[in-house]
Amino acid sequence: MTTTVRLHASSVEQQNVLSDLSWGPGFMTRRALLSRCLALGSGALMLASCATPGRQSAATASATPTGALSVPRTGGTLRISIPGDIVSAGAPYRMTGANVDFSPLVYDTLVAYDTQLHPQPRLATEWDWSADARRLTLKLRPGVTFHSGRPFTSADAKFSLEHVRDPSLGSNWLNYATAMHVTAPDPATLVIDYDAPLKSSFDVLASLRMADPQSLEDTNAGRGFVGTGPFRFQEWVPGDHVTVVRNPAYWQPGKPYLDQVELHVGHDPQTALVGLESGSVDWMSGVPAADALRLHSDPTYQVMLTSNGGTFYYVGMDLTVAALADARVRQAFSFALNRPRMVDTALSGFGRPASIPWPRQSLGYDAGQDQTYTYDLARARQLLEAAGWDTATPVQLALWSQLQITQPMAEIYQADLAAIGVTVNVQKLETTDFSARLQNGQFGGVWMTNMAYMNLSPATFLSSALPVRVPNTSHYDSPRYHDLIAQANAATNDDQLKVVLHELTQILLDESFVAPIAEGTSIATGPEVARTSVHNATWDTFGLFVYEDIWRDP
């Protein structure tokens, strides 16, 4: 099963093809999600195995298969161009920027999801829920060691789960981690107790990377990164490259296949693209959509669409700014978004316009609600007038952008807002500064970036995604909103949850502190394109690559 398709030259055709896909096989309804959680009920232990979870590949993304059925070749170096540098502070607990590419190389998770979101063994080999779903007991894989040689134990897992409770860290998993009471009764056993059933928190176990607590000071300083993953950190030259080498003591025998992986910082996408086409790199992350569309028909390349419903672009608004305090102003800003043009211009058709933050396979998706904000400048102008917006005394607002892919979106938005008497100044921030403002709610205006986790449990998105959780970047909260998120966490059946999600979505539409733009088909920075000399390029539910399975031709 795969989330990718043979692409077509026309972006309109591409939109139609992507629409027909129903957005890939990695998606499931809330009913299916609850079913797989209940399957882990009292006494339901997972087998202690080393089975590889179901993965999604790029086998149909190019004219030539990637060779996933061939016998893997060992050795060699894989060179990947990434659109920005890694961030050492908070790694691996904050998945920002290039850390998305880097962390799966060095760090592991306790469990993994297959393409149907069924948990599979990783650092944990079996688990058991108590009858009342308030206690989760996990058994850890024996013989796993950190890259330092020190054994990985339940005390290390406990540290990671508790460490993300620190608000200053800025982890998406803050709210879930706060609800977990973690103990380590022996080195091979991890116990998590809950005050109330919260089975959606399993998403944390499938996402949170396990780091060596004894080396975090070096990690934050950028001197070293120590995990249990398939590759060991070798060197980091800030602004240039990161190199990792094969971990000979990796817990999966015979893996990884590669000797080395180099992540090269491609500051300019066109220069990085030249490197891909000349062969100086084997893979480029964040290829401009128009170029990915061009390369799809060349048998030298494979185009990988990895989002799994977990990439949405949006506009956020800071409610502490007086000009944005009135919901009618924010609604006007949402009507001023020309979503179809942004999809066509910035994404070259690799996406679909969206008014709500749910992929179409989600229980939260409602087709009527998704049509709430069509592009309508006349309606936007009426709302501004009703809110008393004074066009004679223009308000200067900053429109912050981080991603290369959102720059043309921001420029389109700037022009349309100007047409209704709103002046915004587009300003691009580096990843570190942008991430800090996002986590701390310090934009003081409007911003444009991506959000994630919509393809997991709806409760996970509402509890963990920075734009919508409480606290959120926009500083929005209300007693009803807070209560509904709690109800989403506690819901035990589809019908109950669907009612809650419909009301929550309506609050998002009415308050418009978050205005979705589009659902993307790849990581936030754009499609991944690799040469077909790279084999078995597969990714997980979070769109992260399974590097231990990848190999390449000489």
Image (cartoon, grey):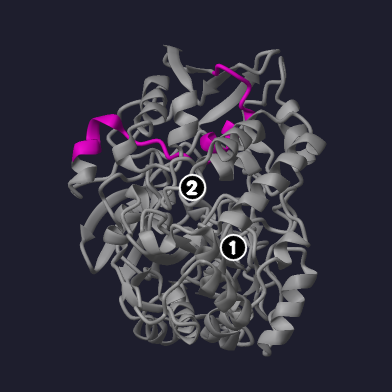
Sequence order check: which comes first, mark 1 or mark 2? 2
Question: Is label 1 in contact with label 2 (beta carbons under 8 Å)?
Answer: no
Q: In this rendering, does residue 457 appear at all?
A: no
Q: Position of residue 315 (x, y in %)?
A: 49, 65
Marks 1 and 2, how far apart at CA: 23 Å
Q: In this rendering, does residue 48 appear at all?
A: yes
Please say whether residue 239 is one of the residues in the magenta stretch: no
Q: Position of residue 171 (x, y in %)?
A: 39, 42
**Which residue: 78% across, 62% down?**
368
Q: Secondary structure at mark 2?
A: loop
- Quadrant where the N terminus is found in the figure: bottom right
Quick one: 303 or 267, which is closer to the camera? 267
Kindly identify the amino acid type of the residue bearing the numbered disc 2: Lys
Is 466 located above or below residue 347 in the figure? Answer: above
Quick one: 128 or 142, which is closer to the camera? 128
Q: Secondary structure at mark 1?
A: loop
- Magenta segment: 194-217
Q: Quickly name the residue at label 2.
A: 255
Q: Quickly name the residue at label 1.
A: 306
Kindly identify the amino acid type of the residue bearing the numbered disc 1: Thr
**Which residue: 71% across, 78% down?**
15
* Picture disc at residue 219: none
Quick one: 441 or 545, which is closer to the camera? 441
Please say whether residue 214 is one of the residues in the magenta stretch: yes
Viewer-nearest of discs 1 and 2: 1
Q: Position of residue 378 (x, y in %)?
A: 61, 82
